[in-house]
Image (cartoon, helix red, strand yellow):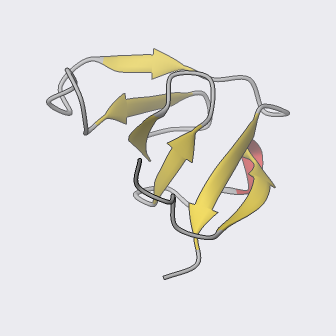
Amino acid sequence: MATPPPRRRIKFCDVALGQRFYDPVSEEYFVKESESLAAMVTGIGDGTNPDEFEPDDIVGLDLN
């Protein structure tokens, strides 16, 4: 099993628009599109169907 990259925990509301982040619930990467929406860009996501996030949702930013 691969070791995940080191990540910093951050609230969704603090992620910059256009920034890629890791969602620990879905275990996939997303790109923030608005204050409440982000599009999955890994796994089954192709970046075209946004998902809703709450401002206080905890996500991860890769440190690399």
Residue 18 spot, x, y in % from top left: 40, 57
25 or 19, nearer to the observer: 25
Residue lying furthest right = 56
Q: Viewed as shown, does residue 54 lie left or right of 62? A: right
Residue 38 locus on image (x, y percent):
44, 33
Q: Which residue is drawn at 25% across and 17% down?
A: 49
* Picture residue at 78% right of the left edge, 57% below the top: 9
Q: Is residue 20 left or right of residue 9?
A: left
Residue at point 60%, 27% (across, down)? 36
- Farthest residue to the bottom: give it: 64
The residue sitting at 65% across, 53% down in the picture is 60
Is residue 24 found left or right of 1 in the rendered image? right
Q: Total number of numbered labels?
A: 0
- Which image quadrant is residue 52 in? top right
> x, y percentage for residue 29?
40, 42
Q: Residue furthest front?
A: 1
